[in-house]
């Protein structure tokens, strides 16, 4: 869970995705 969040945060920084879109992205990840 923590590792997933860490990875997603790096992905968010890399893609510079808006936060609402990121939330949907996180929900898609099992």
Image (spheres, rainbow, N blue to C red):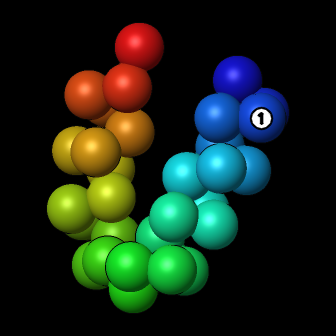
12 to the left or right of 26? right
17 to the left or right of 6? left
Q: Can you say whether 20 is above or below 6 in the image?
A: below
Q: Position of residue 7 (x, y in %)?
A: 65, 50
Provide the residue designation for mark 1. Answer: 3
Asked where in the image residue 27 lies, by quadrant, the reply is top left
Q: Can you say whether 3 is above or below 13 in the image?
A: above
Task: Say few, some or many: other residues with alpha carbon within 10 Å of mark 1 (under 14 / 14 to 19 / 20 or more).
Answer: few
Q: Position of residue 20 (x, y in %)?
A: 24, 64
Q: Which quadrant of the figure contains the C terminus?
A: top left
Asked where in the image residue 2 lies, by quadrant, the reply is top right
Q: Position of residue 6 (x, y in %)?
A: 73, 50
Residue drawn where x is 54% and y is 80% of the image: 13
Residue drawn where x is 26% and y is 28% of the image: 28
Q: Can you say whether 28 is above or below 23 in the image?
A: above
Q: Residue most toward the right?
A: 2
Residue drawn where x is 39% and y is 85% of the image: 16
Query: Callout 1: helix, strand or loop?
Result: helix
Q: Position of residue 1 (x, y in %)?
A: 70, 23
């Amino acid at each position: 869970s923590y590792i997933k969040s860490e990875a997603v945060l790096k992905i968010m920084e890399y893609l510079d995705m808006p936060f609402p879109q990121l939330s949907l992205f996180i929900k898609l990840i099992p």
